[in-house]
Image (cartoon, rainbow, N blue to C red):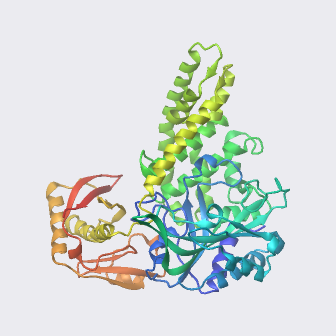
Amino acid sequence: MIKAKELKEKFIRFFGERNHKQIPSAPLVPENDPTTLFISAGMHPLVPYLLGEPHPLGKRLCSVQKCLRTGDIEAVGDTYHHTFFEMLGNWSLGDYWKEEMIPWSFEFLTKWLNIPPEKIFVTCFAGDKDAPRDEETAILWKKVGVSESRIFFLGKEGNWWGPAGQTGPCGPDTEMFFDTGKEKCSSNCQPGCSCGKYIEIWNDVFMEYEKKKTEDGFRFFPLKQKNIDTGMGVERTISVLNGIFDDYQTEIFLPIIQTIEEISAKNYQESAKPMRIIADHLRAAVFAIGDGVTPSNTEQGYVVRRLIRRAVRFGKTLGIEKKLSLPIAEKIISLEQEAYPELSEKKQTILEQLDLEENKFSNTLSRGLKEFEKIIKKSDEKRLIKGEQAFFLYETYGFPFELIKEMAKENGWEVEEEGFQKSFEEHQAQSRKGAEKKFAGGLADHSEIVTKYHTATHLLHQALRDVLGNHVHQAGSNITSERLRFDFTHPQKLTPQQIQEIEKIINQKIQENLPVKMEKMTLEEARKKGALAFFEEKYGELVKVYFIGEYSKEVCGGPHVNSTGEIGKIKIIKEEACGSGKRRVYLKLDN
């Protein structure tokens, strides 16, 4: 039986032998990227380099990246959907191309993972008005030994990756599937079918286009360089390699499931769906809180709150009356802390946040039960809970539909399932619109104004240290085209005089038109030069250090102006608390 640790080590070793440098997993919350809430693929932290900026470690990279995807929350509960997962990936930044990648893919799958060649089916891009049919990739698959009968062509919906937003790097891909041996669901069953016969295990993206918005609409343009971007999900691959075909019965999830069985005194085989949801959602919440997310009503915090509350709700369907998040979180941390030491370091915070959130939800749950009682006390000859009433309980109080049906049945009532589904689908449509709006700028905005704000972040950081003291260090930031938000460590509210002094220093350094220079060096060398670096877990062997004159030295990977005079004038518009021992300032360009 192959374990997750062994799979990850094999992947990194395979590409290490082919001159790839391993980069560390970036935190789940993207740095200075307002277009997405979480890192959802290994390529997200690499967007500037896919667009042509040189990477400090060269043109060949690989990683094991923590990912969190919110689009599949409602689908979690089957054997293979997840919100949090680990993604294995390798990249060529304008270096090798299909001729190398296809044989490597086949070699890794068949020689290193021992998958029988006849079990591998592949799909290639069928072509459309934006890009030609990818016969080249199909020929390369035949060359390594995949017969024509196991090669299929699909359109953009199946064989095109990206962009993550409306704009950005993208391209055709080729996907590798494992044939489980199940019977075909129909004569049309082929890789890409959702029946479970074929399971996707790896994806090679040929990232050679950039989607841009023009006066005539969206168009695809050739990238400055051709890139390879691959993705292999650890959880699903481990399931396939061990012939289990239920991710939640692999060594990754099984100890968590067993903990849930103990708490609930229920059996997994009889209660698989709620147990999968609890295991997945609390695993995602543990990692997100470990990366600094606090459950709240906005952005990343809202997603984490929703995951925790959904886990607690499904705990109720298992009859769990006592708290469930703490023992499960303890188990998750014990399983993952070797690979991710930050979970051990942040253990107290993770447990406190989960406990606080579960306590808050208990009160909401009580109010929801009272609302349910009101509904069934009203006279109704049909003894039917209407669809919109059921959805109100679902949306406002977090009651899963299964729980509403169960409670209704206990009282001799039924639930209008069709009406609930209609309300649910309308809600999903609105959510999708919101998500599209969130991604409207494309992945990783590197526009002129965002570049100015990014450089202003360095000036703000140093000015805060000048005025408040060297205990100040960055705790997070978020940049949009409208403003800069900067979180930092400091115990007290800033006085108006301190804010005025910080603002004055920044504008003075802008007026001095200081040059902005970048040098590559090791982290140790950067520290010796006095560079600020507070996010050690995401740095590789070499880092980029940005020098703003003699004033600021900081390790960073984002876009910067050539000199501070390009920024213009700034204005601090707000200062507030954002957690224990942390403050937050908002800054705008005042041109």
- Which is more toward the observer, 102 or 89? 102
Residue at 70% in and 72% down: 6
* Residue 112 in sight here: yes
Please indicate whether residue 102 sits to the left or right of residue 56 in the image: right
- Which is more toward the observer, 278 or 517? 517
Q: Quadrant of the C terminus?
A: bottom left
Q: In which quarter of the image is the N terminus?
A: bottom right
- Which is more toward the observer, 462 or 508? 508
* Residue 362 in sight here: no
Residue at 84% in and 57% down: 182
Please indicate whether residue 501 sits to the left or right of residue 271 in the image: left
Please indicate whether residue 423 sits to the left or right of residue 502 in the image: right
- Which is more toward the observer, 580 or 377? 377
Please indicate whether residue 326 sits to the left or right of residue 447 in the image: right
Q: In this view, does 52 lie above or below 408?
A: below
- Name the spot of residue 97 as percent of width and height, x first: 61, 83
Residue at 52% in and 40% down: 427
- Name the spot of residue 113 as percent of width and height, x first: 75, 74
Q: In this view, does 212 lie above or below 264?
A: below
Q: Quadrant of residue 369?
A: top right
- Name the spot of residue 548 as percent of width and height, x first: 26, 79
